[in-house]
Image: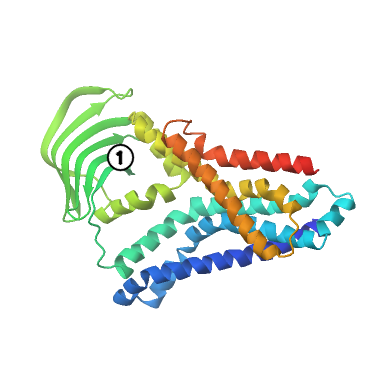
Amino acid sequence: MRILDKYILKNILFCYLFILGVFITLYFIIDISYTLSDILKSKPPINTLISYYLNMIPMIFLTVSPFSLPISVFYTFGELNRHNEVLSMRASGISVLRVAFPIIFFAVTISSGSFFIQEKILLGAQKKMEDIKMHSIRKNYSPQSEETNLAFSSADMIFFVGKFSPQKKTLSDVIMFEENEKNNITKKTIVKNMVYENNKWKARDIMEYKLDDAGNITGTPEYWARKEIKLDEKPEALIFKKSILFQFSSLKNLRKEIRQLKQVKAFDKLANLTIDYNRKIVEPLSTLFMVIGILPLALEIKKRRAGFSSLGVGIICSFVYYTFMYFGIALGKGGLILANFCPWLAPLFFVSAGVTGLIVLK
């Protein structure tokens, strides 16, 4: 690695870590102020609180890192331009692309780390955090509102629930699909009502249909007035599935959900899940996409107060990126553009603008 690369990387690394630390600290302060009354009431052990906030770090990192690096890039190049260092590099024959290389390399590293955290760490950390919140911080918390149109999977089954009442611990108007070891849907079950009693889900008015490989009903349906349903999740776990599971689920789990929805022909839910799947690919890579998009502007910025201007411009560029992304997602959920394409609207725009700008500067 050249001395120039090390010099730029050292500057960007220190700036990035500082800004990331500031954002994480602010996030902790906001959360503590929000949960302080619950903490004072429940008085959890200090090691429980430490575990709670340690498990919060992966989510905070994925939230604030895409903002931290663009601000760091603007600040670093703002300082270099203020001392005419970028001009000196270019005057000595170093191309713009060569100057930008260490920044792109660093962005690739951060995006790869974000992808790893999302896929391997995030879901487990969120489950531990939610468990601590429910049993140690908000002990008396009991959700009152009913949920409608709940969809989730459990083991080898996928559930579509018309209404879920956390307070009554009931599921109503349930349709279940069961798959075999070859991942083919073999059974469809319709349940009028399910209630959680004695650590088991008990159902009434059950109609069960066997399905062939094409998903068509075969044979005579079976009926039970009452039957125990194989569902391991407790009501509070279903609350977790509804509130954050799809948001923090891995790509592997989402691919399984998509395959199951295709098999049962639930195309209305399939479109939204396809958008979520592509969004989970885009989001950890957003740091890289934004950095490529802002590099031409960062290389040209010449401000005396680099810190203040980089903060403002970095936040504005991040805001524009996420506005484009959520606009594309809204268009996709409205059926106006393809579900596989809509989360990629912002990355395509930023990468196109960045590459074009770097070519022009060259």
Q: 157 above or below 243?
A: above
Q: Nearer the viewer, residue 362 or 223?
A: 362
Quarter of the image where the C terminus is located? top right
Q: 349 above or below 39?
A: above
Q: To which residue does mark 1 refer?
A: 157
Q: Nearer the viewer, residue 35 or 265?
A: 35
Question: In the image, residue 305 lies at what x, y percent?
Answer: 71, 65
Q: For this view, does 51 lie left or right of residue 303?
A: left
Q: Nearer the viewer, residue 320 or 138?
A: 320
> Residue placed at 60% from the left, 51% from the top?
317
Residue lying furthest left in this view? 225
> Residue placed at 30% from the left, 39% from the top?
157
Is residue 290 in view from this perspective? Answer: yes
Residue lying furthest front in this view? 304
Question: In the image, residue 129 lies at what x, y percent?
Answer: 39, 63
Find numbered disc 1 in the image and state the secondary structure of the residue it sits on: strand
